[in-house]
Image (spheres, helix red, strand yellow):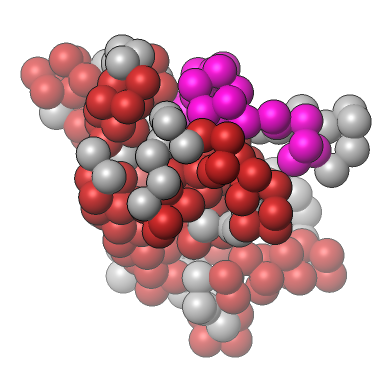
Amino acid sequence: MQNALSQLIFNYFETNLKTDELIRLDKKKLKHYGWCTEETIQPITHHLRHKLDKQNFLFRVKKLHHFLVENLVERKLRYIASDIFGIDLNKFKRNPDEVIRSIKLLNIILNYIRISEETGLNLNQDSAEINNRLLENELVEIELIKHLNAINNLRQLDSHKGGTKSDEKLTKALNIFGLEKNQVHDNYLDACETIYDKIELELRELRKTTHNIL
């Protein structure tokens, strides 16, 4: 997705942003040594056993969050949204003190691109109109963002003790992925594979959407 976003920004705004400025991964090192050697990727590539207990499931999700979200360069996402797309981020704050973080920034950026793709509005020349539409209740939670937020909630459970609230958060997060807690029982193997598959599918769809307007 970062490659497509970098290309899109260069094509429309003549601004050169390298992919390693958007995500903290050394692509040269990855090409030379392989993806499985990278410390934030390695834990999520380990072979899954036939049974995966809750604690190991949450550990996997925590590492997936690290790879997908914590590796994002928040400063660059804010630069794309504010300086390149001209989005007034203050208008998307729930309160004046809110600091808009990576997942929300990514959602705003993807919505900007979505509106351009759906309407044919030019990302650069029609920026004012796209921003108007963003403010007119057209900011939706992209499917990928729903799942990244669910992963964020799950990874927080890794360091929390069990209890009613913890169980409720787990159930709610699983439901977002179309999973039912009572179907999981004590084996989270299928749940883990479902999360991986859905995230991969959504990243493919986003790349396709971005390529449509390149």
Q: Residue at x 90, y 31 (%)?
A: 96
Q: Is residue 4 above or below residue 211?
A: above
For the C terminus, which image quadrant? Answer: top left
Q: Residue at x 89, y 28 (%)?
A: 97
Residue 193 found in image quarter:
bottom left
Q: Is residue 119 left or right of residue 130?
A: left
Q: Is residue 40 left or right of residue 33?
A: right
Residue 67 found in image quarter:
top left
Q: Residue at x 50, y 70 (%)?
A: 177
Residue 89 located within the stretch drawn in magenta: yes
Instruction: Work out whether residue 5 can be spotted.
Output: yes
Q: Residue at x 52, y 28 (%)?
A: 85
Q: Is residue 88 above or below residue 172?
A: above
Given residues 96 and 29, the one toward you in this image is: 96
Q: Main secondary structure of the magenta part?
A: helix
Location of residue 136 in the rendering, given as x and y in whole percent from the top left corner:
70, 54
Q: Is residue 73 left or right of residue 91?
A: left
Q: Is residue 92 left or right of residue 176?
A: right
Given residues 188 and 75, the one toward you in this image is: 75
Q: Is residue 46 above or below residue 14?
A: below
Given residues 175 and 59, the one toward you in this image is: 175
Residue 42 found in image quarter:
top left
Residue 36 located within the stretch drawn in magenta: no
Q: Is residue 21 above or below residue 104?
A: above
Count of numbered circles in the view: 0
For the N terminus, which image quadrant? Answer: top left
Instruction: Work out whether residue 158 can be spotted.
Output: no
Location of residue 76 in the rendering, given as x and y in whole percent from the top left corner:
50, 19
Location of residue 109 in the rendering, given as x and y in whole percent from the top left corner:
51, 39
Q: Which residues are magenta?
A: 68-93
